[in-house]
Amino acid sequence: MSLLFVVGTVSCTLFLAVNGLYSASDDVIELTPTNFNKEVIQSDSLWLVEFYAPWCGHCQRLTPEWKKAATALKGVVKVGAVDADKHQSLGGQYGVRGFPTIKIFGANKNKAEDYQGGRTSDAIVDAALSALRSLVKERLSGRSGGYSSGKQSRGSGGGDKKDVIELTDDSFDKNVINSDDVWMVEFYAPWCGHCKNLEPEWAAAATEVKEQTKGKVKLAAVDATVNQALASRYGIRGFPTIKIFQKGEDPVDYDGGRTRSDIIARALDLFSDNAPPPELLEIINEDVLKSTCDTHQLCIISVLPHILDTGASGRNSYLDVMLKMAEKYKKKMWGWLWTEAGAQSDLESSLGIGGFGYPAMAAVNARKMKFALLKGSFSEQGINEFLRELSVGRGSTAPVGGGAFPKIHSVEPWDGKDGEPPVEDDIDLSDVNLDDLDKDEL
């Protein structure tokens, strides 16, 4: 009976030893995949973290020294420990290959340093204070390393990441799944070299895409090593993985290039695919012309025949051609305008249209005050050829007459109906004696 009791006691002791070297009463903070990001990565504190295995003899010998150092550094430097045998994903994230491995997480939490010092409490404390001194000097000189745990950025270096939206398990669905916008989401790991190479490109692209799409396409990032539920949900197997999310559709992989120009091009394609065609506006006052031409690289201005020459059906057929071309070239994000012949005669003259040859079309660059005229037919084929040449930088241009847009007259917008000829005064011939007219005049 006593032998069984002794055996049971020994077994219990071994069980406790194998399942952890630290307890809640120690000043060593136990770290896991659940709390590591919040405690360490999002912290402004300096951290010393030991990655250990409970069965490791070197780890067991280090334990009392690690506890002693943690107590001495309490309130000054954070000291933690990760059971890397139990939490292998966390150990793998930081390249842990043997036990114990000690890493120092300083100003840049994405670039943890290996601790190479002695395994005594004195050596550990000395190394911690030295690292702390370096951290304070960096902050004093303004070179804080800059890991920002804010929602808008990650990492450090490589440019401004303010427009990359950091997503988590908790915020993902609210921001992405329920959004009408298009999302390009990078799943990354902080230790991944390819992710670090992509980071400045992703950040630069995020800012450009935000500006060009008015925020309708968003670039985001998910730390897949911390937000493991999301990584599992979307089958993330390698880093970086980029997925495209659009409302009502299954996510698709982005398999394009990793430069900012590649990323921007894909984002603009997504934007144009989902954007409505540009508005086709009638020039009824100066504000319409200026607000359209000043906010677009080009504004395409058509001068259509007078309504009495075409009727409503004829005019609508011209407008339909313009709408089809606006849809075809919507990726260019040009402005589209039209006016009736004679309604803005000064504008016509400044664009070399000048009162004949309707319908006519001019593409105007308001910043340079230059324009190009459609030389071919006012048809889908003719306009397509004209715009295609412009889109690749070809075609002859001329300066806008006078170097600026002329005065624009305010006119009533077209009501969509056939025009009515002006009413002429009736001539009363009742008092005219035709017999008195000279026969030569008849």
Image (spheres, rainbow, N blue to C red):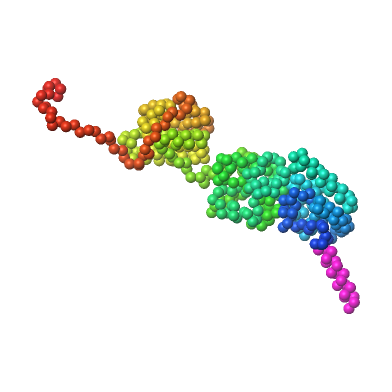
Residue 365 is situated, as x and y percent measured from the top left of the image, at 50, 31
Would residue 331 be visible to someone looking at this image? Answer: yes
Q: Which residues are magenta?
A: 1-19
Q: Position of residue 213 (x, y in %)?
A: 55, 42
| The stretch drawn in magenta includes residue 4 | yes
In the picture, measured across the screen, residue 425 lies left or right of residue 287, that is left
The foreground one among 316 and 442 is 442
In the rendered image, the vertical position of residue 101 relative to residue 311, given as above or below: below
Above or below for 393 versus 119: above
Q: Considering depth in this image, is 166 or 205 the residue closer to the camera?
A: 166
Q: Is residue 433 left or right of residue 43?
A: left
Corner quadrant of residue 163: top right
| Magenta stretch, main secondary structure class | helix
Q: Residue at x 33, y 41 (%)?
A: 417
Q: Is residue 146 above or below residue 398?
A: below
Question: Could you tell me which quadrant the C terminus lies in?
Answer: top left
